[in-house]
Image (cartoon, helix red, strand yellow):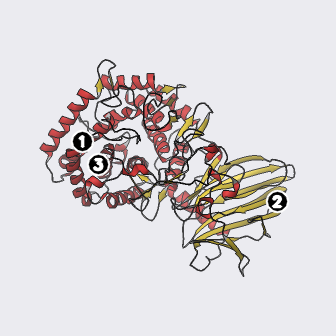
Amino acid sequence: MGARIEDYALIGDCETAALVSREGSLDWLCWPRFDSGACFAALLGEPEHGRWLITPRGEAPRISRRYLPDTLVLETTFETPTGRAALIDFMPPRGRASDVVRIVAGLEGEVDMRMQLVLRFGYGAVTPWVTRMKDGGLRAIGGPDMTVLRTPVPLRGENMTTVSEFTVRAGQRIPFVLTYSASHLPPPSRVDAEAALEQTRAFWTDWISRTSVDGPYAEVMRRSLITLKAMTYAPTGGLVAAPTTSLPERFGGERNWDYRYCWIRDATLTLLALMNCGHHEEARAWIAWLHRAVAGEPAAVQIMYGIGAERRLREWTVDWLPGYEDSKPVRIGNAAHHQFQLDVYGELMDAFHQACRAGLPTAPAWDVQVSVVEHVAKVWEQPDEGIWEVRGRAQHFTFSKVMAWVVMDRAVKAVETFGRPGRPEEWRRLRDAIREDVLARGFDARKNAFKRSYEDDGADASLLLLAELGFVAPDDPKFAGTVAAVERELLFDEVLVRRYDTRKVDDGLPPGEGAFLPCSFWLANAYVMLGRTEDARRLFERLLQLCNDLGLVSEEYDPEHRRLAGNFPQAFTHVGLLSTALNLMHGSRPSEQRSERESAAGARPGADAAA
């Protein structure tokens, strides 16, 4: 089975990504796109389902690893009784083909190494036909997929795998280059590994040099930004929620989902994080992607799309994979794409609003926004599946209603602030009506807190966002009461926040999950808004300790096993980290950073820095 989730590192080329274990095993890679079939799927099964291992022979070495500064180039150092060697892993920026480059560098003495390449296309189902080419490369073909492996070391076949044993000495650098292409095309050209390394280092250092962050958290912020950049799909501007599927929210359970798609909600928050840190190019590309994705009938707007804006994300299960630590099923696709989630319209309108404030071109999409406003005016009173995509019955979720309010609020602001044509009086009346409905039905005066839904008086972590969205003022007692309710009902171990209490809520799935880490960052942000800056800082610094040694973090944390859980790395969590770091870096309440101090809506925390 795969390694612990926190023992993986990420490499990628902004079109797909791979996970490499601490021991040097590449256990996950989907080629040629994030959402393609995996050719290495040991992460969700066994080595025979596909992996690429390069590691010392003999007794277990001492291992350390790092990313080369300000890059996505991974360096793993193995120390053995006879010497030290480094394994340098990276994926160069995409050219005509896609490559994984692995360089074994001798540092001291000599180290006996072994390599095992187990290629299995189609999520471990297809064993390719392997032939040797005239230039010495090994070509593997299975259906539409082809890879070519080139290296100077001798290779041999063994039990339907490719293996090698070799020795690296101090000063030697031995390259392995695996290149993907479609099987009907000629074999891809040879890649100069050392030149590709310099090209890749330059790509990442140049990109991160445009980042405008400083202060005590600058290093972890830069790492999160590089991670988010790695999860962008360069050809279209889309952004995946995570590069993996079916890493469990609960070990051995069935809360296993495919996150290799673009959630409007997640990508909107990522857009804000990128803009706030000086990266407007990716924000422009994503706004263009968003316009293309949602164009059409407003009623057909989805909560998520494919990375190319595809709409059909049919969910099916890979029954031949046993799942990560026997967590079944392994899901491909995501059935939640057809759910009705009212909040997504609010995220959509807020994305355009924040982009407009930052000076990005959004006027061509105004007609789409108006159609969204008109649609929400008709459907906002309906129950929905909510932000957490419950697979139980639809409800009148309080957060969903608030996001309907956001739709109307941002529409009014587009007219008043940016001069867009519209019907502001009508939209203002509807905004007020939605607000009155939420206060009457979504607020529990007895608890002095907003409720999870009109039917459920329990706490919900999404309600921590109400002040950020401008629905309530940060100093409103109703907001302080809501934060207190989350602390009482959802906070445990002083740092971890559940989305809601799955033990008491029927969400259509067996109960039990870990802490959803973005919610813990939301709590830290709420503390900042309440003026509890030191509480926010303490919480934030404890959350940073949950990141792995490379600064990567997943979707959830399992407090029972004290391990990361869920898909990895998770864009939503890294965005939460960036948001809290920005708030602490500014040293003031997010509300005080707003350029427009209106009684209703304002920017998300830190957003004014980009305006």
Q: Nearer the viewer, mark 1 or mark 3?
A: 1
Q: Quadrant of residue 558?
A: top right
Q: CA distance from mark 2 to mark 3?
A: 57 Å
Q: Position of residue 404 (x, y in %)?
A: 26, 41
> SS for tag 3?
helix
Q: Which residue is mark 2?
A: 170
* Label 2 crowd (10 A; few <14 / some 14-19 / many >=20): some
Tell me which amino acid carries mark 1: Trp
Answer whether residue 411 is visible to the viewer in this image: yes
Where residue 474 appears, x then y in whole percent? 32, 29
Mark before the other along the chain sequence, 1 or 3: 3
Residue 568 visible in image: no
Q: Earlier in the sequence, mark 1 or mark 2?
A: 2
Q: Any mark on residue 338, and which?
A: none
| Cα gap from disc 1 to disc 3, whole angstroms | 15 Å
Q: Nearer the viewer, mark 1 or mark 2?
A: 1
Q: Counting other residues with Cα less than 10 Å from the Cα at mark 1, is it few (<14), some (14-19), or many (20 or more)?
A: some
Tell whether label 2 touches label 1 (CB within 8 Å): no
**Secondary structure of residue under mark 2:** loop
- Under mark 2, the amino acid is Ala
Find numbered disc 1 in the image and state the secondary structure of the residue it sits on. loop
Q: Position of residue 256 (x, y in %)?
A: 53, 45
Instruction: Name the residue type under label 3.
Output: Met
Q: CA distance from mark 1 to mark 2?
A: 67 Å
| Residue located at (75% from left, 64% from top) | 173
> For the view shown, which residue lies furthest in the top direction?
446
- Number of on-image labels: 3
* Marks 1 and 3 close (CB-CB < 8 Å): no
Kindly identify which numbered label has been placed on residue 380. 1
